[in-house]
Image (cartoon, rainbow, N blue to C red):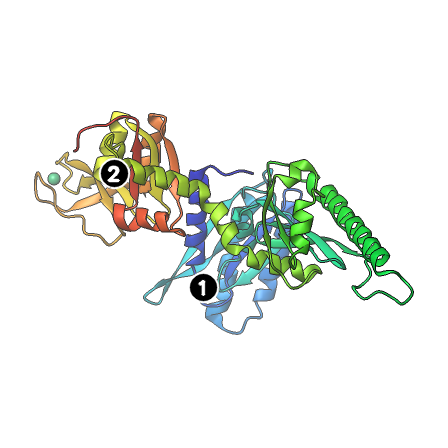
Amino acid sequence: MEFTAQEKYEFKRLLDDLRSKTGRGTELISLYIPPDKQISDVMSQLREEYGQAANIKSRVTRLSVQGSLESAMSRLKLIPKPPANGVVIFIGSVDVGANRTEMYSTALEPPDPIVTYRYHCDSSFLLGPLEEMLADKKTFGLIVLDRREAAIGVLRGKYVEPLKHLTSTVPGKQRKGGQSSHRFQQLRLIAIHDFYGRIGESANDAFLAIDPKDLQGILIGGPSPTKEEFVEGGFLHHELQRKVLDALDVSYTDESGLYELVDAAQDRLLDLEVTQDKLVMRRFMKELVSDKGLAAYGEKEVRHNLELGAVEVLLLSEDLRKTRAKIVCTNRSCDFTESQTRSGASAPLGNCLKCGSPLSIAGEEDIVFDLSKLADQSGAQVKIISSEFEEGAQLYKAFGGIAAILRYKTGHV
Ligand code: ZN
């Protein structure tokens, strides 16, 4: 499933939150239930685990594990049948500091179907399967070759999948006695050409089977001049030929060469990933210094422009850790309310401007969602920008993580 920027952000934040939770012993339960799994089977496993937990020697751990299992079972009772992608349940007493624990539980339908049933108990939640769903599923074709050997594979997200290994019958440079040197060289070139042809055919079979939308590019590795000969010789289908991104030096041309190729292409791959973000950030920087000045930054100014409907693209840093809170007065007979942007739960609220009583929070949400909603109302595009590249880091550091490209110029706030 393709995520929208906001969904991806929300999912990332949820994983961050889950990652931060720890238990004292092994009482944090992670349940991954595939769509076709019977809930009754899961229930009977949990009941069995509950019985087993009676053998745990430490009283505190025993009660804590059994408590988690009880909560898991009552949570499951509410789910008669897993939803389309299955369901993930995280449950257990988590450490909340000051020697206290608190029962935590959440259930969610993942963005991709769960394939394997898992019941996992540990001092932290099992997040690997969800992290994999969030990972980039972009695919790259990989070819490594020299004149004797070649390997073909794909890179999906972070995983290299070797597909085919080929060897040639190209004779070595040393001719055997009795052959004329010229004849030998000719035969050798024909054999090399044939081998490149076979590599090309295998690569065509493998890469044309991939949805062209998913196939981001093809990387080729090997010694010089072999890889250049292959790239320039037109051995690949013309659709694939257009997707060749780079030819890089690698020393192995078997399966391990595929991994070597991915390592060698890291910078290139990272560039591709952030290109979209980079382009929009560059546009913002350009507007910032241009005469037209169709740029705004800082929460106050951007919010003002959003309210006017003047924002074309809203740029939000992935590292923003702020909330927008609705604040009310604790004095019941006072009607004072305001909205505050807060950085962290411990930021002081201050006192009522009307009556001086302490203030309290009536509702709070992530500022990314608060501003995204405003953007949606005026049809502005929302980009949530990673800090993993220079311009992205600048958005966070120099512009407070909030910026906009404007449709038209407005006055400053
Ligand atoms: Zn008040």
- Type of the residue with mark 2: Val
Looking at the rendered image, the quarter that the C terminus falls into is: top left
**Residue ID at (41%, 58%):** 20
Residue at 50%, 39% in the rendered image: 3
* Quarter holding residue 329: top left
User: In the figure, is residue 343 to the left or right of 14?
Assistant: left
Of 46 and 288, nearer the camera is 288
104 on left or right of 348? right
Q: Write down the residue under mark 1.
A: 23
Residue 52: x %, y % from top left:
61, 65
* Label 2 to label 1: alpha-carbon separation: 51 Å
Q: Horizontal and vertical percent for residue 202? A: 76, 46
Where does the N terminus fall, quadrant-wise?
top right
- Mark 2, secondary structure of its residue: helix
Mark 2 lies on residue: 289
Where ligand 1 lies, by image quadrant?
top left
The image position of residue 122, as x and y in percent, is 52, 64
The residue at 35%/67% (across/down) is 99
Q: Amino acid at mark 1?
A: Gly
Asked which secondary structure carries label 1, the reply is loop
User: Which of the 4 image quarters holds residue 179?
Assistant: bottom right
Q: Image point 65% across, 64% down: which residue?
A: 251
The tag earlier along the polypeptide, 2 or 1, is 1
Q: Is residue 364 visible?
A: no
